[in-house]
Amino acid sequence: MNGIRHAASASAGWLGVDWRSIGLVFVVGLVATLLIVGLYTAGIRLLAVGAPDIRAGADGDPEGRGAVTATRVAPRPVAATLGGYACFAGFAAAVLVGVYLVIPAFHGH
């Protein structure tokens, strides 16, 4: 029993905190956040390719009375559509993995 207590205190750092574990959680959380947000924004951007532009009217307000929506110049390329859907699929998969990791009932223990 005394050896277990000694080993636990040796792994704890300053103030009894395991700073490597906290750093690991921070880095993994940061990478996951960048991945999820990046996939979502890339998906939106790819699906917006070829979307009609909103041109501001004489008053300069894009939401005012004089605003005009331009017609779509060309249809969205198939590669952009598939890429957008792939980004959203990756985004959804990352969110589902996060939910799986957070909710213990899914682990079966």
Image (tube, rainbow, N blue to C red):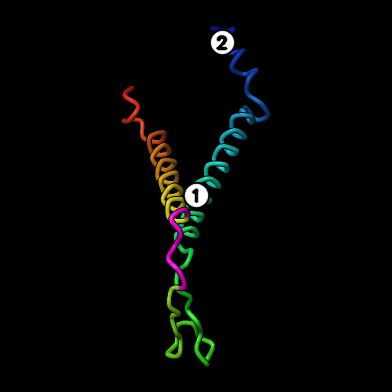
Secondary structure at numbered mark 2: helix
Q: Is residue 50 above or below residue 63?
A: above
- Percent x, y for residue 84? 45, 53
- Percent x, y for residue 49? 48, 63
Which residue sits at x=44%, y=43%? 90
Q: Amino acid at mark 1?
A: Leu
Q: Quadrant of the C terminus?
A: top left
* Label placed on residue 65: none
Q: Is residue 49 left or right of residue 9?
A: left
Magenta range: 73-79
Which residue is tagged 2?
4
Which residue is tagged 1?
39
- Percent x, y for residue 93? 41, 41
Q: Is residue 62 above or below residue 36?
A: below
Estimate how packed mark 2 is, as few (under 14), some (14 to 19) or many (20 or more) residues with alpha carbons within 10 Å: few
Q: Is residue 101 above or below residue 80?
A: above
